[in-house]
Image (cartoon, rainbow, N blue to C red):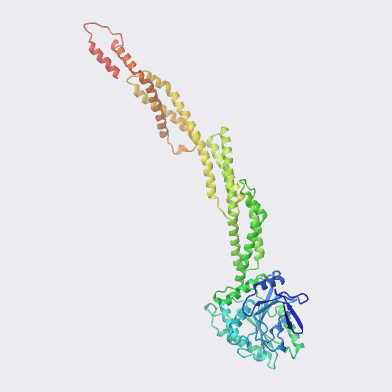
Amino acid sequence: MENYVAGNYEKVYLADGKQAAGSSSSYSTHLIDGEGKFNSSGLESFTQNANLSKSGKSYSVISIMGPQSSGKSTLLNHLFQTNFVEMNANKGRSQTTLGIWLAKCVNVEPCTLVMDLEGNDGRERGDNDTSFEKQIALFALAVSDVVLINMWCHDVGREKAANKPLLRTAFQVMMRLFKPRQTTLLFVLRDKTQTPFAKLEQILKKDTLEIWNSIPKPQSRKETAFSEFFNIKVVALSSYEEEMETYLEEVSELRNQLSSGEIMSTSDESFVPALGFSISAEEIWKTIRANKDLNIPPPTVMIAKVRCEEIAREKLEAFLANNEWCELSEATSTNNPVPDFGNKTSSLINACLSQYDEDAQLYEDDIRQERRQMLIDNLMLRIKPAYDSALQVIITGKVKEFKDAFENDLKGGKSFRDMVDICVERYSSQFDRAFEDISIPEGNWDCSVEKEKFMNEINAIVGQARGEKLNDLIHEYNEKLRDTTREPLEAILGNPGSETWPNIRELLSTQSKEIAKEYYQAMSQLGGDQDTTSLDDIQTQFQGYLKQIIVTKAKIEAPKVANLMQDRFITMFLQDSDSMPRSWNEDDIDINKIIRVAKTQVSN
């Protein structure tokens, strides 16, 4: 805790920037110290203690710059009831404010933040250390809506005392770094003189515009008017020491003008939400200190990127920790269907995005939408495993349901082909409905691969059943072929002769063709192979089977050949050409010739 004497009362500051009990309700913090260190923790505490989160974009920032010991802190304290440290005249004129102090104004609406800058042109830093003065001046111009330039009336028209070098540097850098936002430059002329106010105002505006016109400008800003960046206002105050009462009246009038918006620009294009002021201010200061002036984005973009990323991260973590989502995610790992998974998950996503939209509504639209899409992408990345599990449960479950239903339909005696078409169509539709039940619009996921996998599995079940049916059918018609050819074949082989093999070939052709037609008709009721298997192919298959039957039957009849040949020989030897018993006359019978003829008949 430090004690400072200001005027005729004592101000007490705590380390976190909050005032001690019994002091004013103003909050303050040492934003940037004399060495250029940014007080992040102090600003964070300041943001909380001052309830900046409630202000949204309805707030303003006012800063003051000017020569050392020119009464800047005193002016702010009287204007806004702040508690900035004031110079103790009894100790001599010296540096009082180091760096930048930040305070919230008391009883001012909308919320107003005030920055008290270290005075320039001080003997403590001298002429060789003006870079810090330029940096804090640039910082003030970057974050403020109104910049009070405190100076003595008799310094109007001068160079350093009128802040011309400082403004020249600030203007030049501002031209490159920031988009126009019409910051108000309020010249506060201290200790009125006999020079007419209108003349002083004219000189200040003329000198300021000359500074603007003299600085080099990037190509994109060649035609940019001063008025696009700045407004100039000028006020004059009486002497604080010699005309205290008048001074206080004029300060009160200035306070009214500032709080009413009479001086301040009405444009809020470059405003950042009050809650994000701490992030924006720190990022701008870091960039200025690192001399990355050409790469510094507008404050609105800075704060939008940082805050929207934080908000998106918070909402993602909250979604993943949500009990309802945790239950849904766990349910997908149980191999049981999760009713209404898609709608429930989508509802949680929408709630998460609505919360994001509400918290991020004050930030740049492009950045907000970009981070919103990143949030959606991250959500989908975390949700996808549970979704895939739910989809796999559907595939597994529907395949089993199809198999059971298909087997039951087979037992019912329905037409195989009609039953397949109806059952496959029914379960294809059921899969589509189940997919819709788990689908999540935000994911925009395609299930074509999973649908193909599902259809392949049920088609494999159908194919297996069709194969079994075809095997049964082939066996049935093979047996039928065996039965229909048994008697004709036995008759042919039982009485062999010169026509035996032609008769066998005829039997092979006619019977295989007949059974092939019947089989082809029966096979068409099963669907599938009839489009790729011709009737000739089927006939060839049955011919092959019938040949096996004939060969087998021939092998059975083969041992009887010797007896048949002997019987044939005897028959031909003992009978004449008319099949009559032969008469044996000693004179006209040629025994050797009869034997040769009988042998010939047997060989045939």
**Which image quarter is the C terminus in?**
top left
Q: Nearer the viewer, residue 40 or 235?
A: 40
On the image, the x and y values in percent for residue 332 come to 61, 49
Quadrant position of residue 593:
top left
On the image, the x and y values in percent for residue 443 come to 58, 55
Q: Nearer the viewer, residue 596 or 499?
A: 596
What residue sits 54% from the left and 38% below the top? Answer: 420
Image position of 309 with respect to 603: above or below: below
Q: Is residue 229 left or right of residue 111?
A: left
What residue sits 52% from the left and 78% below the top? Answer: 219
On the image, the x and y values in percent for residue 467 come to 49, 36
Image position of 428 with respect to 507: above or below: below
What residue sits 53% from the left and 50% below the top? Answer: 448
Quadrant position of residue 140:
bottom right
Quadrant position of residue 141:
bottom right
**Which image quarter is the N terminus in?**
bottom right
Q: Residue furthest right?
A: 22
Q: Residue furthest top?
A: 586
Image position of 106 with respect to 485: above or below: below
